Amino acid sequence: MSKNPIYVTQPFLPPLEEFSRYLQEIWDSKTLTNNGPFHQELEQKLCEYLGVSYISLFSNGTQALITALQALKISGEVITTPFSFVATSHALWWNNIKPVFIDIESSTFTLDPDKIEEAITPSTKAILPVHVYGNPCNVYKIKDIAERHGLKLLYDAAHAFGVTLNGNSVANFGDLSILSFHATKVFNTFEGGAIVCHDAETKIHIDHLKNFGFTNETTVEYAGINAKMNEFQAALGVLQLRYVGTSIDKRRNITEKYRKAFSGLPGISYLNDLNGVKHNYSYFPILVDPEKYGITRDELYDNLKRHNIYGRRYFYPLISQFPTYCDLESAKPGRMPVAERIAASVICLPIYPGLNDNDIQRIIAVINYKKS
Ligand code: T4K
């Protein structure tokens, strides 16, 4: 039995002494939240780093999603993927919107554009695809469908920080995109998130919505929420931005080691880099084919655990299988064969900047030897 536990991820943290200077500034200014100087600095630096026009910071990605749906005034039905973290559909549910689940593509695990049109009804108001694991959706095809049917398009880009498609940030696609800066993400502010939008008017509207709907000191125009990012999170974000490029390089390095180790291993498959995409290597999902590999996904998952290695079966079960959603017509078993197959065979292996070579070899050894 090996010693230290290895989890699916571990947050990157900058040197504490560097952060203490930022904390001193907050202590001196006594500005803790409500669009303070670090908040403004982070918004500006993120626009530059990501190559997006406007960004509005949030306390977390889920609040960003919920607020984005409010900003777009969505009601009725929204077409979405079952292969995501449950926050994607919960944001719809919290807005009284009915999710309509459709299948995913086996090449990227993202929403299958060819399944969208048959799911559109008179109540459909929007499409909510997810760039799952940071793999860009088929954004051009989805845009075309949304435009032809007059649907809003909101991307859940929680996994896609820094990902570009043909040189353009994936966060630039759709009417709005949301990001997550949770501890488990490529870029973290402990908790945090953002909405990316295309024009100043929309940003101002979103900023009002996340601050109770206040439009000035005495006017409340909307039933807004409190979803503001505080100065501690924003200051950390400013510092984290200096390191995120190196973090992504380390993740790419680990990805290459995994790919090399598993290429040709019967029954284990993984995705390669996609054409035109600059990836962020946020996750390393493998698919287990029990016929060829010899043991099932869950047996491998348990073997890893016995070796103190905690992969995660993201995203199993499918969102559509949870009690909140399983009675929906679109959630019925058998309707989304690709998503069901992927959810039944996936394990995300540990990947994070601090994962050292010994630990990588430990993980590879268990997968190569199957039964030990
Ligand atoms: N949309 C999508 C597609 C998402 O994936 C998410 C979040 C959202 C929207 C919503 O964004 P946020 O509101 O979260 O900003 C985690 C995260 O909590 C969640 O943010 C994330 N997706 C989801 C994919 O993963 P869990 O329940 O798997 O996390 P947990 O606590 O089991 O952490 C995994 C491992 O990471 C732990 O075993 C150890 C390590 N870890 C975790 C934390 C929190 C640490 O070392 N330190 C930490 O502080 O959900």
Image (cartoon, rainbow, N blue to C red):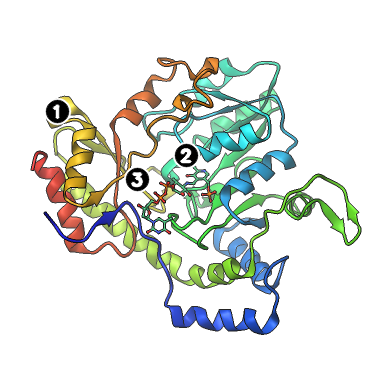
Judge from the rendering whether residue 198 lies leftward or rightward of residue 79; answer left or right: right
Side (left or right) of 78 relative to 267: right
Q: Quadrant of the N terminus?
A: bottom left
Q: Quadrant of residue 17?
A: bottom left
User: Ligand 1 near label 2 (Cβ, under 8 Å)?
Assistant: yes
The residue wearing badge 2 is 85
Camera-near label (1 vs 2) is 2
**Residue at the location (34% across, 29% down)?**
342
Residue holding disc 3? 273
Q: Are marks 1 and 3 in contact (CB under 8 Å)?
A: no
Residue 292 is marked as 1
Label 3 is placed on what type of residue? Asp
Is 71 positioned to the left or the right of 363 in the image? Answer: right
Q: CA distance from mark 1 to mark 2?
A: 29 Å
**What's the amino acid at mark 2?**
Phe
Q: Position of residue 347 (x, y in %)?
A: 29, 40
Q: Give whichever of discs 1 and 2 has the lower sequence position.
A: 2
Residue 241 x, y percent position in the rendering: 50, 68
- The image quarter containing residue 38 is bottom right
Task: Residue 249 in the image: state x and y as whole percent.
Answer: 35, 62
Q: Earlier in the sequence, mark 1 or mark 3?
A: 3
Q: Is residue 276 visible?
A: no
Total marks shown come to 3
